[in-house]
Amino acid sequence: MQAMKPREWSQAQMVRMGFLSRRQYGNFIDGAECEPASGAYLPVVDPATEMTIGQAPDSARADVDAAVHAAQRAFEGAAWSRMRPSERERLLYRLAMLIEEHADELSALETLQSGKLNALARAIDVGAGAEFVRYMAGWATKLEGQTLQNSIAMPPGSRWFTYTQREPVGVVGAIVPWNFPLAIALWKVAPALAAGCTVVLKPSEETPLTALRLAELAMEAGFPPGVLNVVCGRGATAGAALAEHAGLGKISFTGSTPVGRAIGHAAVERMTRFTLELGGKSPMVVLPDADPEEAAAGAAAGIFFHQGQVCTASSRILVHRSLLQRVTRALGEAASSLRIGSGFDPQAQLGPLVSKRHLERVLAHVEAAKDEGAAVVAGGSRALEGGCFMQPTVFADVHPGMRIVREEVFGPVVVVMPFDTEDEAVRMANDTPYGLAASVWSRDLATVHRIVPCLKAGTVWVNAHNVLDNNLPFGGVKGSGMGRDLGRSAVEACTELKSVCMFV
Ligand code: NAD
């Protein structure tokens, strides 16, 4: 393992990123920054250095109320509901442009608050995020209903005209996690705004800074006050208050399965529409004709990308027994060769985990796996001194009942398991409470086409893993959630379908 010490922050870097001049943030409600009602704040910590880089509101129900009411006023008021779709489209384009113009600042904030590699923050949270806003901008002017045939027979000889139209659901509550703070916030915000909804966004308490900056950029782009509001705070307080709020038309959540389940219950209680993007334990199936080195490289990229803090991470590698040794060895070597360091270090390939709490959670999973008898092929402990760094870890000799095989770790930890037949591979792949994604590695088209429909997952990749496109719906089945982000389905999920039946 080539480990690199995280760099010390220089005064100049801190000044450039604006952190010495502005350390305490407010919520963003009705077009303005405001203090939380309680006056309480939570620290935002850089996991590479464990330095506190800012304070964000520890909001309570009163702040959520204020944000939802502002969003309701903006939705119902003239400014937003009478705006032409092409004007919403123009504003979203302008927001995408501003996100790109602020790429340095936003990606630095992202690396500071989450530890992620700066290149990744730039490419995904900022780059892909802005591209997604542009993609969604186009939908603002393209939502449509249908004219439908009808067979209404009463009164005899009468004529009826029947059609459907899509209408915005109202205020969308969006609760997002810390792994791709800006990108996932945009996954929620952009379709809602394109559909004509207003938004209250609750970022993770670990990573609130880019969401707050996004709200400021939306004002600069020309969105009316109250159209995008951001309330920071803890899940159990601010998050729960938003999820339960009677003023929402829809709640859109990305996060863990237990929290998603609770949010789904609260939504059904009020008959609020909901989308839940939850956890995963995604299998990668390596068939006997696959190239073992290529598959191992794919597995390494699939699990170690962003320290494994990716809902679709390839955390279970299922390999045909004939390739088991070669794939396991190559994956172990790939893990051991990764350079660990601060997200601002251009040489680093693996940054810190998001927080000390999360590092401890991941280490507990690793220790439980060792206790249950799993064999460590690579890694297995924390890395570097100081900071929340974890060695990329590969386990072999695991069996299906082990926690490390069944539970989502959300860290750079992977298990390799053999199979003998295609049926067994499918059975093992589906033997999980989750169903977010899966990948199949083979050049044999007939086999691939046979296996793809058998995999219970929202997305299946072939000879790839973790590849998304703005136009491809994304979401899970089983414990991985309900509904879809991205694509046309995301914007349509922010609308209600109204049937109109006209006597002519
Ligand atoms: P988390 O569920 O702990 O938190 C997610 C968000 O929900 C945060 O903003 C948090 O403050 C809030 N929250 C927590 N408790 C709440 C409650 N009782 N009521 C309302 N809100 C509450 O998840 P996390 O640790 O931030 O993120 C990791 C999880 O997210 C993993 O399980 C991962 O698989 C999942 N995830 C899924 C996707 C996807 O698209 N399917 C994408 C990224 C992450």
Image: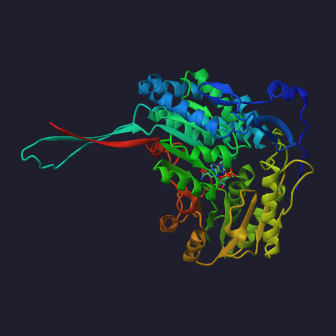
Which quadrant holds residue 431?
Answer: bottom right
Please state if 335 lies on the left or on the right of 269 as rendered: right
Left-right relation of 245 to 54: left
Side (left or right) of 493 relative to 220: left
Horizontal and vertical percent position of residue 489: 45, 46
Residue at the image position 55 percent from the left and 43 percent from the top: 245
How many numbered marks are there? 0
Which quarter of the image is occupied by the C terminus?
top left
Which residue occupies 50% across, 28% down?
A: 73
Closer to us: 236 or 396: 236
- Which quadrant holds residue 367? bottom right
Which image quarter holds the N terminus? bottom right
Residue 128, image x, y percentages: 61, 38
Left or right of 105: which side holds 471?
left
- Above or below residue 356? Residue 158 is above
Residue at the location (70% across, 36% down)?
A: 122
- Relative image position of residue 94 (x, y in whole percent): 56, 24
Whether 198 is drawn above or below 468: the answer is above
The answer, for residue 455, to whether it is visible in the render is yes
Q: Residue furthest left?
A: 157
- Can the viewer see residue 132 in this picture? no
Which colour scheme appears in the figure?
rainbow
Residue 244: x and y, percent?
56, 47
